[in-house]
Amino acid sequence: MTDADIHAGDHALHPAPGPRLKVSLFWRTFILLAMLIFFSSVAWLQMFKTQEYEPRILRNAHQIATVVNLTKTALMHSDAIARVYLLKMLADEEDVRLKTREPGDQIEVFSASGLDSRLAEEMIKRLGTGTVVASRVNDEEGLWIGFQIERDSYWLQMDSARLKPLGGSAWVIWLSVTTALSLLGAAIMAGLINRPLKRLSYAASQVREGHFDGPTLDESAATSEIREVNIGFNRMAERLAKIEAERALMLAGISHDLRTPLARLRLETEMSVADAEARELMAADIEQLDEIIDKFLDYARPDATELGPVLLTGVISRCIAPWRHNQRFEISVDVGEDLQVMAEPVELGRVMSNLLENARRYGQSPSDGITRVEIVARVHDGWVLLRVRDQGPGVSEDTLKNLTQPFFRGDAARTSATGSGLGLAIVERSVQRMGGTFSVFNNSAGGLMALMKFRQAPAT
């Protein structure tokens, strides 16, 4: 088996997903909640800015204008000694400094965009048209208001933080804490929503695989909708388990009851039919009916299977032994001598025997009528890919997808012999019971190919 065959078979067992991005329900719910929190926070900040921040800044601008006006008035009506005391008091208690304004001062005008522009306009409106509002004078930062008293020009310097109530690290800390708590809450909400659905998905997959007695869903869930869904699912699984048990019991009972009359028919045929050719044909028909009964019994077997390391070459050797001397049945094996898989030896032998019998019946080469079967095994990423391929005519694409359905038989090209239609259904069911996967497809070089995937047994 080439690497191309391995990858082609692996792709057949696990088709590549489409280009659409697939996100779990948890992450989709979490992302949607996070986006909702983000846009809500943006809207809240905008509302805070318009309803609280902006009016507060404007009030501060009015207060600053009042301080400037009071300072101007005090300077105008105080003598030299009182003026010195006033300037010292303003610097110490109000953090307001007064400096003489020189023509060569380097001025950086207060920002002229957005809310800062409105602040400057409001102060100029309150203080007069000759007022200058700057954020830096002579490389010294602050809130600088330039005004005149008669013929003299002054700078009044204040702390610019009065116009920035949203600044500082406190807001960053509170915003970080709020964001973290919001995302944590979103994760908890998404988990609460996703957890029961995840359990339901797991239970549905168990039922889909035929494990009706798996873990049941919680029927005492706090949410009424989830509780009703869990109760309904549990009742459905119980009913399916009952139907499956009755079906298996019915098949086993019918098959067992048919064995006694068939044994009598075989005995009467051997003793009563004189014609050797007719006796041989009747015995063959009875043998075929007996084989069909065996198929029914195999299909109706319980699902419990204990897995362990199984030497693949040993099972294959036992299965091909009956056909070693058949000149019209050629089998080639390419399997590592020490290759082991996690399986159940009897179950795995039944799988190989069914595939070989299917190839013997329907896989004759169109050129010479000889059945040629290739059995190849390769290890890939901790799995053993086991391929059984014949060189027969294959089947149509429409028929291919139904070959593993119970009681379905392929087209006339592969139905030269009669049967129960359970062979490949039994194989698929047995492989799945052993934790593997099974797929059937037409080989590009001709013939039908069965590809099985088993977990490789750990080395001892």
Image: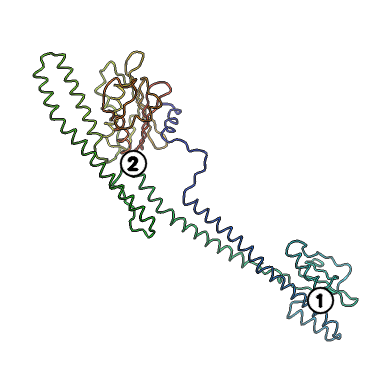
Tally of marks: 2
The secondary structure type at the circle numbered 1 is strand
Q: Which residue is mark 1?
A: 98
Amino acid under label 2? Glu
- In the image, which disc is placed on residue 451? none
Distance from the alpha carbon under mark 2 to that under mark 1: 86 Å
First reached walking from the N terminus: tag 2 or tag 1: 1
Above or below, 362 against 40 in this view is: above
The residue lying at 16 percent from left, 30 percent from top is 258
- Expressed as whole percent of the image width and height from the top left, the position of residue 382 reads 40, 37
- Expressed as whole percent of the image width and height from the top left, the position of residue 152 reads 89, 76
Q: Which residue is mark 2?
A: 209
- Expressed as whole percent of the image width and height from the top left, the position of residue 424 reads 31, 30
- From the viewer's side, name the closer residue of 263 and 378: 263
Report whether 296 appears left or right of 230: left
Q: Nearer the viewer, mark 2 or mark 1?
A: 2
Above or below, 324 against 33 in this view is: above
Amino acid under label 1? Leu
Would you identify the image quadrant in which residue 179 lies? bottom right
Quarter holding the N terminus? top left
Would you identify the image quadrant in which residue 172 lies? bottom right
The residue lying at 45 percent from left, 29 percent from top is 3
The residue lying at 10 percent from left, 23 percent from top is 267
Q: Residues within 10 Å of mark 2 (few under 14, many from 20)?
A: few
- From the viewer's side, name the closer residue of 362 and 387: 362
